[in-house]
Amino acid sequence: MEGLFALGSNGSGQLGIGHQEDVSVPKQVEFACEAPEDPVVTIAAGGNHTIIVTELGKAFWAGNPSSGACGIVENAKDVKASKFHELVLSTPESHGPVVHVACTWDSSIFVLRDDSGKATRVYVCGVPDVGTANISLGSALSPILLKNFPPSGTEIQSLAAGFRHVVAVLDNGDVYGWGNGRKGQLGELYNEADSKGVIYHPRKLNGISFKVAKAVCCQYTTCLISEPGDGRLLVLGADKWELKSTAPAEIPNWSTITASWGGIYVLQRDGTMVAWGRNDHGQLPPPGLPKLESIVAGSEHILAVTEGGDVLSWGWGEHGNCGPQTEKFGDVKGRWNVLASLKHLSEGSQITTIGAGCATSWINIKIDGMFL
C-alpha cells in the first residue's frame, strides 16, 4: 500500500493534510473521498493548489480552487480544501485516464488518453492567459478542452509549466507552447501574441536544431534537451541568474532534468548532478552530495533520493519545506537535510515518488503490505 506525505507551505490547505498550517516534518495526506488503491506517480503544484495523479490515471486536488485550477468544484470561490478531492473535468464518459499534468501559479493543464489510448486530450483549468482565446475570467472556471491540438497523428510525450507558461513535447520531437511568452520563453512570438506577450493557443516553437526529448520550465525560461546519448540543450527566455549564458551545450549522459523558478538541474546516469542558476538561498547542489537516484525541483528548493534511500532537501525552506533545521531566512545552504530515510522503515520499504512545488515537498513511501 502507498502512503503520501507532505510538508511545507499550507495556507490554502494545499498539502491535503487536514488543516491549513505550515508543517516542517512530513505528514500523511488525507482524502475527503475514497483513497486510491494504486500508487501516486505524479505530483504537480501551483501557487496554492496541488494535483496528484495515480498509476491508473486518477487525479485528485487539494488547496484553493478559486481560479478554476482544480477542475469543476462547487462553490469554488468559497472553498479551501485541506484534504484531497477527486478531480472532475467533465462527465466520466467523455474522457480517459490522466497521463500528464502540469501547474502554473494558478492554472492546471491535464493530458488525458483518448478512445484509442493516445495522449491527445488537453484540458486547461484556470486563468485565461494559459487557456484559449476570447474567454472571460468567469468562463475560465470551467475546464476547457483545447481544440486542434496536438496535431493529427501525434500525441503528447511530456508536459511542463513555468510561472505562467506551458510547454508540451510531442512524440515526434516537436515542441508547442502557450501562455505568457514576453521574456522569450516561448521563442520568437512574431505577431501571434497579444500586447502583453500572451499566446492563447499552443503554437510550435521553431528553429530548434534537434529532436526534443524533454522540456522543463523556470519562472520565465524554458530548457529543451535532446535524447540521452545526444543531450544537446537549448535555453529560451530570460537570462536572469545566467540561465542561458552559463548553460552547457550538451549533457549526453543525462537521465533526469528538472527546474526551479531560477535554476536547472540535470541528474546524470552516474548519480551526479549538473546544475546552474540562482543560488542566493543555497538552491544549487551542496558539496559532497552522495550518488542520487532521482531529483525534483520546487519553486526554490530541491528534493533528491540517494542510492542509499535517503530523501534529501536543500535550498529555500522558509515554510518548512526543507525540514525544521534551517538557517536565517529559512535557508538550507551548502548542506542538506534528510526528510525521510529507508533506514528508519521496515525491510522492503521503498521511496516510490518525490514531488516539490511552491515551498511544498512530497514523499510517497511504500511499506511492504501495510498502510502507513
Image (spheres, rainbow, N blue to C red):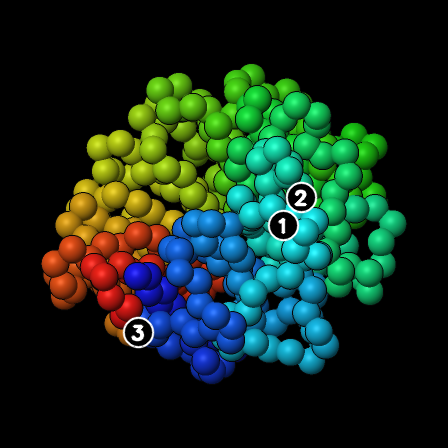
Q: Position of residue 148 (x, y in %)?
A: 76, 34
For numbered disc 3, what is the local secondary structure?
strand
Q: What's the CA distance linking mark 1 and mark 3?
A: 29 Å
Which residue is labeled 3 in the image? 25
User: Quadrant of the image for the C terminus?
Assistant: bottom left
Q: Is residue 273 found left or right of 17 in the rendered image?
A: left
Q: Residue at x 53, y 37 (%)?
A: 158
Which residue is labeled 1 in the image? 109
For numbered disc 2, what is the local secondary structure?
strand
Q: Residue furthest front?
A: 93
Query: Disc 3 residue type?
Result: Val
Query: Disc 1 residue type?
Result: Ile
Q: Is residue 55 visible?
A: yes
Asked if 322 appears above or below 115 in the picture, the reply is below
Q: Position of residue 74 (x, y in %)?
A: 71, 74
Q: Quadrant of residue 22?
A: bottom left
Q: Residue at x 30, y 74 (%)?
A: 25
Q: What's the CA distance linking mark 2 and mark 1?
A: 7 Å
Asked if 191 appears above or below 59 in the picture, the reply is above
Which residue is labeled 2 in the image? 122
Asked if 52 appears above or below 201 in the picture, the reply is below
Decide which of tag 2 and tag 3 comes sooner along the chain. 3
Query: Disc 2 residue type?
Result: Val
